Image (tube, rainbow, N blue to C red):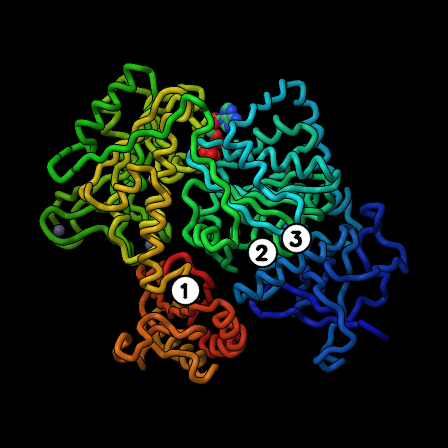
Amino acid sequence: MMATIWQVALDVPLPGPFDYSAPTPLAAQFGSEGGSEFNPIGNPIGDPIGRRVLVPWGRTQRIGLVTAVASESALAPERLRAVDRCLLDLDPLPSRWLELVRFAASYYQVGLGELALPAIPALLRSAQAYRAQKPRGGGPVERARTAWAQTAESVESARSVEPAPVPELTADQAAALESLVLDRGFRVHLLYGVTGSGKTEVYLRAIDRVLSRDPLAQALLLVPEIALTPQFVRTLQSRFPAWPPAVLHSALPEAERSSAWVAALEGRARLVVGTRLAVLAPLARCALIVVDEEHDPSYRQQEGARWSGRDLAVARGRIEQIPVVLGSATPSLETWHNAATGRYQRVDLPRRAVAQSILPAVRLIDMTRIKTAEGLAPQAVAAIEARLLRGEQSLIFLNRRGYAPVLACQSCAWVSSCPNCSVTLALHARMDSATRGWQLICHHCGHSDAVPRSCPACGEVDLAPLGRGTQRLEESIATRFPSARIVRIDRDTTRRRGSTEALLLTVRTGEVDILVGTQMMAKGHDFPRLTLVVVLGADSGLYSHDFRAPERLFATLLQVAGRAGRAEQPGEVLIQTRWPGHPLFAALRAQDYASFARGELHQREAAHLPPFAHQALLCADATAAATALEFLALAKTVLLPCESGRVVNANAIANPSANGLGLGLGLGAIRIAEPVPMPMARLAGRERAQLLLESSSRPTLQALLVRNLPALRALGSAHSKVHWHLEVDPLAI
Ligand code: ADP
Ligand code: ZN
Ligand code: ZN
């Protein structure tokens, strides 16, 4: 018999896919076209590729995904187990979707199942839910469909609300829209538009065009933050009432996630909006992908399979042969470089959309000569006062939550530090309890301690907070401006579901005078009454071991500056710094991203850093640093001998510039550095180390990884005390 072996991807820490024999009898299937009824005997499955299956795994059952069929298996027939059931309650996942996850798994060097299964909502891949032969009240898919129908209905009934008026495009927007190539297959566009230039309106028009010309087409819109989804959903709902958007992000209740996911697969949802994981949504007929704020680091998945949602969006565009729009005021240097070299097409929005709105004036406050107890320079205080008098809003940006980053002894060198990580414990005021208590919290592993009454090292009682976080800032501002209405927005004040939305609403409706916020505030929000932004604590990003730190700082500052003066009143940005002469600030004051990018790219090229080199990072952790480092040293020997002569052992180059290699590698060479402890060496009780691989050629690096992954995996199994993973295109090294 032909093709009786089904290859099944499973979310297990082994590469897979795994061979199973086809289910016998074919009767053992779940669901039918009609819905949840148990399938009658003999229902033809047809092509099983892309179907979910229930399979035995050890002594349990799991749900996997059929990725291929074969006529024979390398496994001995007696070791081959049979698929228990093929789940027919849902259409097979589209072949292009399978191609996408296959590409992603191979590019990021992770098992296909590890990447593909987590992309399926938990309810639809829980063996538990499918174990019963005949579920009551419909299976998970049935319930997801019902839930979607209800969502769509409620949107329908809310339609009585006046639909949003469609603004007339500005000349810039009209020109940008016309230069998007939306009907000729795969094209990547960089929509480079200053903050407030109206990129959203261009996305909406592009979506409208693509969905209007094909009644089955779907569009995918990616946003960097969960907090930004409600804003986009509102906009989409009022603009396109006939196309209720399906929302996908990691904080959704499972039932909602299944409902949106099934609607995307079945084409009921024409619009899909979500954070990075939505790039793996199974849209059956994806016709356009928009990635808003494409530079944002949160597009990078940092746990489990590590991948970039932005890069996968481009890969998906290529696989689906559809247009992709990447939007940003501060594109990543990788994207900027791709536009400069012609791989992406750059489309500019050089001015703000609202006619009277101009970009805010950026001023630096030299803090070297200013002593302040409360952290705000007198100029900043005066500027806030002026806003209060005029009834305008101010945002004070400090990217550090908690009361203070560290508690220190005044008499000795003791500082509060995390027992599990190589960082200090931050001091937090506990706002939840009625009695205001204090707590020391690790921002990396979550470890918390009570505040000691006296110094654990010397016994002195004068422990004091050092530095300033948003809580402390909020406190001193409340003292300074007693009549002002102040709200703090950071991860501590927005833990509850929906609380961010509620806080943002108070800002939008003008119930707030002064806003204190972290990173969360920098992105995308549109507050028409906000005319002043004061930036504190920016200096830590100026000089950093991380070569991407300036890029991130520039993006954050430009974004946060972009919150000011978005409507008619002009905005002002004050940056408190001890390095007013730093070139980054010069580019920022001129709001000149292009010149900043030019300078940075120049340095990157000279130093052979991305985007001029391609990197992979092999990360290992263990309870002892030596164990992790030894593992990486062994890994290096596994990686080294492969392509004789072409892999350069950085060790062997005593004087890199003398032998003409420099850091500049011969084309296609791979440089493997020495194993070193990670910048943050200890995390959650594990000692961490890394091994950096670099090449000027992406294919060469890819080939090396593909060829040696099995050997690395074998090495990993032989060192069970070491946890390891590979990061391709790491964001931080
Ligand atoms: P960006 O995402 O580029 O920072 P937004 O899309 O948030 O900018 O738009 C900034 C502001 O300009 C919003 O308040 C938006 O309503 C307004 N806007 C955008 N396009 C137009 C237009 N064509 N006419 C009038 N106002 C517009
Ligand atoms: Zn002490
Ligand atoms: Zn910790």
Amino acid type assigned to the residue bearing label 1 in the image: Ala
Residue 201: give x, y in percent of width and height: 55, 31
- Per the image, label 3 sits on a secondary structure element best described as loop
Q: Mark 2 is on which residue type?
A: Ala
Whether residue 556 is situated above or below residue 230 in the rendered picture: below
Q: Which residue is mark 3?
A: 321
Considering only order in the chain, which callout, 3 or 1, is on the residue closer to the N terminus? 3
Q: Are marks 2 and 1 in contact (CB under 8 Å)?
A: no
The amino acid at mark 3 is: Gln
Residue at the spot 72% in from the left edge and 61% down from the top edge: 54
Establish whether ligand 1 lies closer than 8 Å to the Cβ of label 2.
no
Of discs 2 and 3, which sits in the foreground? 3
Q: Residue 76 location, x and y as percent?
A: 73, 82
| Mark 3 vs ligand 1: CB below 8 Å | no
Compared across the picture, whether 612 is left or right of 708 comes to left
Q: Residue furthest left?
A: 411
On the question of residue 556 being in view, the answer is yes
Q: Which mark is residue 613?
A: 1
In space, the residues marked 2 and 1 are separated at their CA atoms by 19 Å
Q: Is the CB of mark 1 within 8 Å of ligand 1? A: no
**Which quarter of the figure has residue 476?**
top left
Q: Which residue is mark 2?
A: 315
Say which quadrant the C terminus sits in.
bottom left
Query: Mark 2 packing: few (<14 Cα in 10 Å), some, or many (20+)?
Result: some
Sequence order check, earlier mark of 2 and 3: 2
Quarter of the image where the N terminus is located: bottom right
Q: Please give left or right for residue 473 compared with residue 291 in the image.
A: left
